[in-house]
């Protein structure tokens, strides 16, 4: 994503004027963004220096142009006829709606009037109206709008729109067509629901998502991918296919297809584009159905180079020093999708050597690393984090990685082991 130095300079002034950053912090951020060749708006959001919605809001106030939440927009396919994807990416805009002769587009730089005039020519003289978003949101929206897989989903849904996905519905539950249940269980590749679930999974992998959220709303089924720590909505099947989609995933992960009132956990192993990918699956009963979350464990996408993780130079030096010490403890904490596992596995990869006995205790073992002794926790069989740690002490360890400090006993043992 190319930088826009003129917009960056204006953004520094706007962020300071509206109190989102101090003058010193904004100017330093602009310098660092330039070093990384990133737009300032992207840099301050990635580094969590400014909330993205707040930033879009103050730019909107500054220029008097309304903001827009592109994540909530359902795009009409006809918008792709306004101008092609290359034009959208070149000008960093996304068409949002067409009404009569008025085209509404989302822009990140509302000050670039030359760009808007150019788009008028492309749009055959139609009136252009603008709304405000960020470069990041616009690029994501453009990908959604012009994504061929989204069209594939739409075509697939049209072909299965005959109502045969559900036999009947009542107030308490819904019963699937017996033929559909058979197709789901057999993995019939011609079954619409099997195709749809495969498409959902494949596109998440291609988008380098870490999680897939399948969420039952009152009147619709929502599909979201978590990429770079943030959830983004994608093309979703209709509400009537909700049970069929969840049932197919349950079958794939060896869950009880008939149990809908209790949470369940399972695993899926798939071969995608010539590589093995694991999925950790969880279902949770909600008011309007079962929510399903798939954690994608793709070892080929795992960063194992600490320098690629975005550490500040001094922090990287300090972290490398810390992980190589013969004693002590390092705690890696953060919210879902923040990169905890990636950081830990990258650290393990850096410190592993033939001279050291490196052991991990995990639930589950997300990525298998050659040369590392990895212990999978199994509470049902008595192999808890605490029990595993006690046994590890008799295994002559040099380095230990604990997946979770979930109870007092595990924490106490870990602290004693580290001292």
Image (cartoon, rainbow, N blue to C red):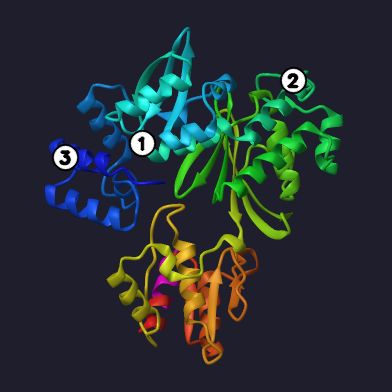
In the drawing, does residue 130 fall left or right of residue 173? Answer: left
Q: Residues within 10 Å of mark 3 (few under 14, many from 20)?
A: some
- Give the CA distance from mark 1 to mark 3: 17 Å
Which residue matches tag 2?
A: 161
Q: Pick whichever, 69 or 118, lies toward us.
A: 118
Mark 2 or mark 3, earlier in chain: 3
Instruction: Answer above or below: position of 13 versus 29.
Output: above
Which residue matches tag 3?
A: 13
Which residue matches tag 1?
A: 134
Mark 1 or mark 2, earlier in chain: 1
Q: Is residue 68 visible?
A: no
In the drawing, does residue 192 fall left or right of residue 34? Answer: right
Q: Check if mark 1's residue and mark 3's residue have beta carbons within 8 Å.
A: no
In percent of width and height, residue 255 lies at: 72, 47
2 or 3: mark nearer the eye: 3
- Give the CA distance from mark 1 to mark 2: 36 Å
- Give the CA distance from mark 2 to mark 3: 52 Å
Name the residue located 46 percent from the left edge and 38 percent from the top edge. 139
In the drawing, does residue 369 fall left or right of residue 64? Answer: right
Q: Could you say whether the residue bearing mark 2 is in a helix, strand or loop?
A: loop
- Please report the bounds of the magenta region as a residue range: 406-413
């Amino acid at each position: 994503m190319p930088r826009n130095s003129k917009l960056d300079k204006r953004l520094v002034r706007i962020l300071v004027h509206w109190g989102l950053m101090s003058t010193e912090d904004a100017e330093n951020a602009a310098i660092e963004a330039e070093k990384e060749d990133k737009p300032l708006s992207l840099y301050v959001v990635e580094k969590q220096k400014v909330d993205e919605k707040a930033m879009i809001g103050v730019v909107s106030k500054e220029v008097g142009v309304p903001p827009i939440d592109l994540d909530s927009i359902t795009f009409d396919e006809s918008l792709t006829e306004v101008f092609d994807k290359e034009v959208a990416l070149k000008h960093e805009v996304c068409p949002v709606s067409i009404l009569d002769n008025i085209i509404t587009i989302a822009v990140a730089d509302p000050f670039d009037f030359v760009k808007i005039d150019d788009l008028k020519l492309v749009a055959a003289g139609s009136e252009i109206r603008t709304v405000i978003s960020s470069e990041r949101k616009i690029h994501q929206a453009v990908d959604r709008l012009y994504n061929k897989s989204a069209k594939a989903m739409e075509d697939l849904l049209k072909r299965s729109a005959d109502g045969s996905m559900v036999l009947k519905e009542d107030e308490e539950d819904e019963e699937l067509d017996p033929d559909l249940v058979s197709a789901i269980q057999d993995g019939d590749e011609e079954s619409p629901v099997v195709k749809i679930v495969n498409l959902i999974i494949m596109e998440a992998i291609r988008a380098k998502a870490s999680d897939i959220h399948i969420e039952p709303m009152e009147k619709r089924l929502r599909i979201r991918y978590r990429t770079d720590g943030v959830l983004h909505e994608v093309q979703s099947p209709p509400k009537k296919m909700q049970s069929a989609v969840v049932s197919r995933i349950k079958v794939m992960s060896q869950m009880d297809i008939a149990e809908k009132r209790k949470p369940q956990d399972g695993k899926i192993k798939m071969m995608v584009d010539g590589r093995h990918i694991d999925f950790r699956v969880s279902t949770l009963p909600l008011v309007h159905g079962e929510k399903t979350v798939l954690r994608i464990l793709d070892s080929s996408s795992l960063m194992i180079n600490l320098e690629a993780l975005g550490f500040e130079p001094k922090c990287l030096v300090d972290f490398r020093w810390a992980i190589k010490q013969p004693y002590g403890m390092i705690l890696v904490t953060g919210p879902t999708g923040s990169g905890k596992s990636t950081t830990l596995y990258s650290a393990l990869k850096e410190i592993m050597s033939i001279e050291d006995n490196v052991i991990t205790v995990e639930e589950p073992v997300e990525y298998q690393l050659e040369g590392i002794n990895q212990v999978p926790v199994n509470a049902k069989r008595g192999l808890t984090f605490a029990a595993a740690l006690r046994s590890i002490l008799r295994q002559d360890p040099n380095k230990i990685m604990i997946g979770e400090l979930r109870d007092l006993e595990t924490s106490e043992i870990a602290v004693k082991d580290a001292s």
